[in-house]
Amino acid sequence: MYKILKAEKLADKIFLMDVHAPRVASHCQPGQFVIVKMDEKGERIPLTICDYDREAGTITIVVQEVGASTTKMGELKEGDSFRDFTGPLGCASEFVYEDMESLKKKKMLFVAGGVGAAPVYPQVKWLHEHGIDADVIVGSKTKDMLILESEMKEVAGNYYPCTDDGSYGHAGMVTTMVEELVNEGKHYDVCVAIGPMIMMKFVCLLTKKLEIPTIVSMNPIMVDGTGMCGACRLQVGDEIKFACVDGPEFDGHLVDFDQAMKRSQMYKTKEGRAMLKLQE
Ligand code: FES
């Protein structure tokens, strides 16, 4: 059993949990994920690692209530436990293996949308700990939905919040913020975009035009995280990949987002039926 040491509500339907999982904490790297199961018959839920403390043996996860299982997970309290907490899974972010000297010369831009701030945070933190301060744009619908702001500010070079309704920071989409920074004369060698599929698609269309190589995390389309359900199958250039086995990070300019979104819609219908059952 994996005990929840802290459970905190970050925003409406978004929760943070610190889970005692020393083996996962001792091996994980930014970009990787875990699969959690609440009980023996529970659904396997893949969640990107938001933070880790190797000494304390804890992993931080952020959960958004989007279906039946995640809604049940949102009800868990401090002291409750997960039946399974498997990981670290997936490949770590590429920069973890890069030569430090060449990495230090790169100017990196992170673009997070909604709960995408959770997987972006450990990457920006890792870079900060290695003497590299990346710029970070975080977008949300409203100010209240913005998560991990103080944590992100601590590790980012520059932090640019954006809200759709203009209630805080830059008013508008993250893409307009990217354009604004580039028009101001900022130069970026790499962009990492993590968030809703539609956001990643439009960030990639823009960065392709701006000629900024872009990495995306295809975590949103994962269902069981084992390479067996097929939900995360996607076209990357002329290759077929599975986000949970080959990723979750890919060259965003090669990903066929329209096909991936169509596929995840099919699985949403299944999840929608499970949600109705939960409400009966
Ligand atoms: Fe099921 Fe990857 S999430 S195959």
Image (cartoon, rainbow, N blue to C red):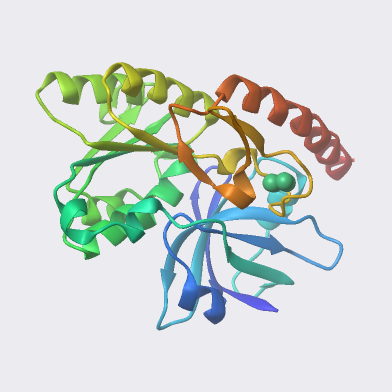
Residue found at x 84% / y 68%:
40
Q: Nearer the viewer, residue 272 or 86?
A: 86
Left-right relation of 260 to 138: right
Q: Nearer the viewer, residue 96 or 142?
A: 96
Answer yes or no: is residue 172 visible. Answer: no
The outermost residue toward the left is 185
Q: Nearer the viewer, residue 196 or 103?
A: 103
Left-right relation of 93 to 64: left
In the figure, 185 relative to 145: above or below? above
Percent position (x, y) of residue 109? 26, 38
Q: Nearer the viewer, residue 186 or 45?
A: 186
The quadrant the N terminus occupies is bottom right
The outermost residue toward the front is 238
Residue found at x 32% / y 23%:
207
Residue found at x 43% / y 20%:
202
Percent position (x, y) of residue 3? 62, 77
Percent position (x, y) of residue 119? 45, 50
Residue found at x 13% / y 29%:
186
Left-right relation of 253 to 238: left
Percent position (x, y) of residue 135? 22, 41
